[in-house]
Image (cartoon, rainbow, N blue to C red):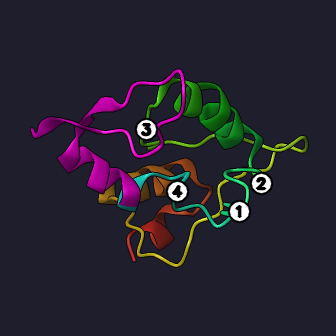
Amino acid sequence: MTIELITNKYWKAGHPKEIFSNLELDSLRRTECLCINCGRKNDAIPYSSCPVAKKIYDEICVPYDMAMAITKCGATDSEGNLLYKPLDKEYHVSKDTIKRIISESNIPNSAKKQ
């Protein structure tokens, strides 16, 4: 783990000029964080298209000079639809998940073996 004291590139009055950063995880955060890699993201106004991401960004990240990686997203709109919109990336589903889905489905046993 590479933790270093770095210059706060978003410094403003009342905030620290230097902050601690885990450099390895920070680069991973940029490629793997669901919020950063959401098709809903509007870069002109950070996270304005997702009320949950906007709340995290406005109420935690900005005031406390923090960055985090969101690895699960269950945020929904008023109708219960998931807000996360995957970008065109490769996604993997584990064999265990596939087995669970098949076992919970109404597929006849003869079809499950094929």
Residue under circle 1?
42
In the depicted structure, whether residue 71 falls above or below residue 107:
above
Q: Is residue 23 magenta?
A: yes
Query: How far apart are labels 4 and 3 at the CA level?
Result: 11 Å
Between residues 26 and 7, which one lies in front from this camera angle?
Answer: 7
Mark 2 lies on residue: 49
Identify the disc placed on residue 77: none
Residue at 58% across, 43% down: 73
Could you tell me if the residues under marks 4 and 3 are in contact, i.e. CB atoms within 8 Å?
Answer: no
For marks 4 and 1 on the same chain, the one whose residue lies earlier in the sequence: 4
Sooner in the amino-acid sequence: mark 2 or mark 1: 1
Q: Which residue is mark 3?
A: 67
Label 1: how many Cα within 10 Å (few below 14, some 14–19, many 20+): few
Which numbered tag is attached to residue 36?
4
Amino acid type of the residue that numbered disc 1 sits on in the rendered structure: Asn
Q: Earlier in the sequence, mark 2 or mark 4?
A: 4
In 3D space, how far apart are the residues under numbered discs 2 and 1 (Cα atoms)? 6 Å
Q: CA distance from mark 4 to mark 1?
A: 10 Å
Amino acid on which disc 3 is placed? Ala
Residue range in magenta is 1-30
